[in-house]
Image (cartoon, rainbow, N blue to C red):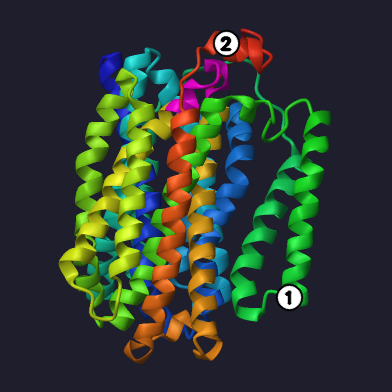
Amino acid sequence: MSPPRRSRAALLVCCGTLFLGVLDGAALNLALPSLQRDLRLSTAELQWVAASNALVRASLTLPCGAVADRFGRRRMFRLGLAVFVVGSLLCGVSSDAVSLIVSRGVQGAGGALMAPPALALIANLFPGAAERGRALGTWSATAGVSAACGPLVGGVLVQAAGWRSVFWVGIGGALLLAVGTRLLPAGVVAGPPRRLDGLGNTLAALVLVGFTFALIDGANRGWTSPAVLVAVAVSVAAAAGYLPAARRRPDPVLDPAHLAVPALRGAVLTAVVAYLALGGFTFVNTFYLQQVRGFSPLATGVLTLPATLGTLVLANVSGRLVGRGRGRVLATVGHLSFVASMTLLAVVVTVDAWLPLLLVGYLLLGAGMGLVNPPATNTAVNSLPRERAGVASAITSASRQIGTNLGVAVLGAVVVSVLAASGQPTGDIARVTAEAGDDFSTALRVAYGLVAVVAAASAWATWRLLRPPAVKEVVATHLTAAPATTTPVR
């Protein structure tokens, strides 16, 4: 196989595992009402089931990038795929909330092991700026397409074989583990491998876990409950302690100097907001369509097709244009598409909303995802020197998971709080029915309006920040260049 063909085959393997991991989480949202009835889960437990995978991935992606640099990217990619398959099997046989939440975390650990080495391998397989831009555009488009296809796939699986079948799709990863990873090259990594930062990673994980716990349980326990206040205190203390700790570490898990690069900050913001919008929308919209409007899982999946089509069409266009230096415009327009989608839904969502208007809102959301994903990844990887491609790829992967986690936690908390204020028993989203449909629709309008405001602010910030800098300027201004040595990747 000639090198170009082998590179394309390796890209296909990397994108295939990404598609599998993202699809699993997106499909799960369609199964949540069925899962809740079967396992008798509370709202908080449902949110933890939806968020635990993304939370673990967000916590572990950056250190896993360092592990992959040290022990070999291909080796860690294979290990991550194996862990993901084991996690999928455990999810499929779970019988209670705790086992399912833990098993979702195992899946997340597998995803964290796979994503950074995959992106770094792509960056090194395609050294030219234009071809690397197209390859990264394909990777990013895969993430958006799989997230958009998830609800339809989930609806078909739940309707045909029940909620457990959603997790069996992870077994398909075993085929990629046995066959596909043989196509991944050994390659080389420029620069010495990074040292692990146990303290920094622990503090970063405490920030994420504490903040997520406060959002999810605050809406259910009460915002001033002792457990929530302790979680907030832990999160704030960990965040305050991270910067001084990072300054003393030779290789911090997230170097503050990296976020001094404006383009990288813009890429992180773009990824977080995009997946906050998609993750939060998918979580709450499932209950609206199935339990308020009375649609079956399959019908719910079909109704989300406009989002899938919007992502499919525009992700391909965006992936091609991003290699031509149009990422800034694409990302900004994508955010404006989020604003239009969320504003429309915030206006029209009722217990008997006209379906064509809802479908237009879904289409605009999918279009936004298709537009913002490729420029976010491409800008992040190109905003740092090539020897730091693994760092940049890990940062953008973690940003997506943080966004998904925030979407489920924030929109879920908003909806539960509004339901509680409306007099619904404990504001229980898990058991909302058509009888509570008016209150639930009001809660959705508040949640969608909040996302529209966030997306509008992000559109302005994206336009200002997403200016791809020259690598030499980045090195001279913000970073200390790594020594020009190479380390074999196994």
Mark number displayed over residue 54: none
* Residue count near mark 2 (Cα–Cα under 10 Å), binned few <14, some 14–19, many ≥20: some
Indicate yes or no whether the magenta region holds residue 376.
no
Residue nearer the viewer, 212 or 163: 212
Residue located beneath label 2 in the image:
473
**Stretch of the chain drawn in magenta:** 379-389
Query: Residue drawn 50% across and 12% down?
Result: 470
Choose the circle earlier in sequence order: 1 or 2.
1
Outermost residue toward the left in this view: 356
**Location of residue 436 by image quarter:** bottom left
Residue 148 visible in this rendered orientation of the protein: yes
Query: Residue drawn 47% across and 18% down?
Result: 187
Residue located beneath label 1 in the image:
224
Residue 490 visible in this rendered orientation of the protein: no
Q: Is residue 152 left or right of residue 468?
A: left
Spatial CA distance of label 1 from label 2 is 48 Å
**Residue 477's x, y, as percent?**
65, 13
Query: Residue drawn 78% across and 75% down?
Result: 226
**Residue 105's x, y, as percent?**
56, 59
**Residue 320's x, y, as percent?**
25, 26
Kind of residue at badge 1: Thr
Query: Residue drawn 27% across and 32% down?
Result: 318
Kind of residue at badge 2: Glu
Residue nearer the viewer, 134 or 263: 263
Q: Is residue 196 left or right of residue 237?
A: left
Q: Secondary structure at mark 1?
A: loop
Indicate yes or no whether the magenta region holds residue 388.
yes
**Location of residue 287 by image quarter:** bottom left
Asked if the residue at tag 2 contacts the one at tag 1, i.e. Cβ–Cβ closer than 8 Å, the answer is no
Residue nearer the viewer, 439 or 25: 439
Q: Which secondary structure dominates the residues rendered in magenta?
A: helix
Q: Is residue 68 left or right of residue 267?
A: right
